[in-house]
Amino acid sequence: VRLLTGDVGGTNARLELFEAEGDGFDSASFALVYSKVYASSAFESLPALVLQFARDASLSTDKPVDACCLAMCGPVKDEQFMCGPVLPEQPPTTWKAHVKDLLQGDLKGIVKQAVMVNDFVAVGLGLTAIDRSTQLHTLHDAPREKEGVMACIGAGTGLGEAFLVWQQQQQQFMVYPSEGGMTELHAHSEQEWRLRNFVTKLNGYATVEGVVSGPGLANTYRFVCEEKGVKPQEAEKDLQKYVTEQALQRQDPVCLEALDLVLQAYAAECRALALRYLPSGGVYICGNLAQILLPRLHTVLTQAYTHGDPVMGELLRTFPLYVVTHAELGLLGAKVRAHRLWRCSASE
């Protein structure tokens, strides 16, 4: 049994091939046999990307893929096609990708069945397969319901959000997507109101991810520099990395203030997420950025999450808050969905 999984982002696309001996019903029996990272911009369509991987992995009609799941950087409708806006900086959003195109043409007979999911839905699916004893870091401890609703959030290039609900009949969690990161940014102080106005002038609007993201950190740094009359350091390649490093090493008070402003906004969105979904199964902060910022999450975000709401704080403190330390959560989730897809067809 073979599974093809992938995480297709705006910059890179990482694809993996798994094989299992025996009947394959146990997901743990699948072993990684091949993986490769491609530049997304090198391809004009999703089939072209998958076909290149099939050739590199020596797949053929005699050695086909039994199930495929690809996590895509954008909204996906019915696990079949991408339906979001075209973003020039993210090439896959221009592909108008559709699952049917993976099952015909040069890929006919090589890929037996396939689905696509939003990349943060894949992150949510990955949550169901992590090793909780080694791949979770607790920021706020509280009793957790094993089958309770879970909410996940992750800042990177943008801000992803999703929630998981236990399905008793299927005995598994289902993941539901959200575009919560694109909701309007709310201010909780005079300084945050000025930051909101700064981001509005910069982008024409102020969303949560306009502050709570890598680019949002750069926006916030420029705002703090303007407030203090300081000329911003424009790092040649990665301003976000520069601000993060300077803040965590306490080398630059402007960088530290900018980072803490972002973490205050991050905590506010975690609170909003918790109040929307009442996640008795926990709130999970995902993504590499959270792992990098872990020391500061403890001192700033956790305090703001547990004590930042004077009205609903008591309720919020009943929901545990975690940081997920698994490095490739989206790829893990794509594997979970591909295995479910194969298992369902094999059971028919």
Image (cartoon, rainbow, N blue to C red):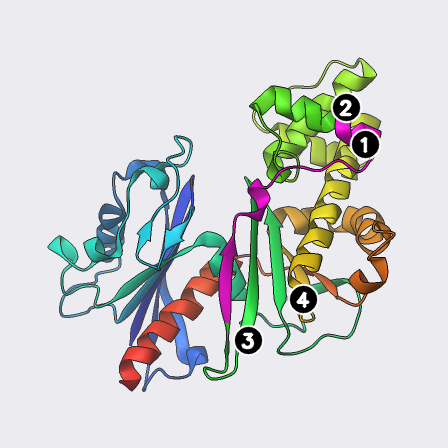
Q: Inspect the magenta stretch and tell me whether residue 270 lies in it.
A: no
* Location of residue 306 in the rendering, given as x and y in whole percent from the top left corner: 83, 56
- Secondary structure at badge 2 equals helix
Mark 1 vs mark 4, CA separation in Å: 30 Å
For the residue pair 311 and 347, the one nearer the viewer reads as 311
Is residue 184 part of the magenta span, yes or no?
Answer: yes
Residue type indicated by callout 2: Val
Residue at numbered disc 4: 279
Residue that numbered label 3 is attached to: 166
- Mark carried by residue 137: none
Q: Do callouts 4 and 3 mark residues in contact (Cβ within 8 Å)?
A: no
The residue that appears at 18% across and 60% down in the rendered structure is 103
Question: Label 3 is placed on what type of residue?
Answer: Trp
Quadrant (top left, top right, bottom left, bottom right) of the C terminus: bottom left
- Position above or below: 114 against 348: above
Q: CA distance from mark 1 to mark 3?
A: 40 Å
Q: Could you tell me residue 116's position as x and y percent?
A: 35, 57
How crowded pointer 4 is (Cα within 10 Å; few <14, some 14-19, many 20+) is rated as many
Disc 1 secondary structure class = helix
Find disc 1 in the rendering and name its residue. 257
How far separated are the C-alphas under marks 3 and 2? 43 Å
- Mark 1 is on which residue type? Glu
Please provide percent x and percent y for residue 138. Answer: 75, 64
Q: Earlier in the sequence, mark 1 or mark 4?
A: 1
Q: First in sequence: mark 2 or mark 4?
A: 2
Residue 148 visible, this orientation:
yes
Q: Quadrant of residue 185?
A: top right
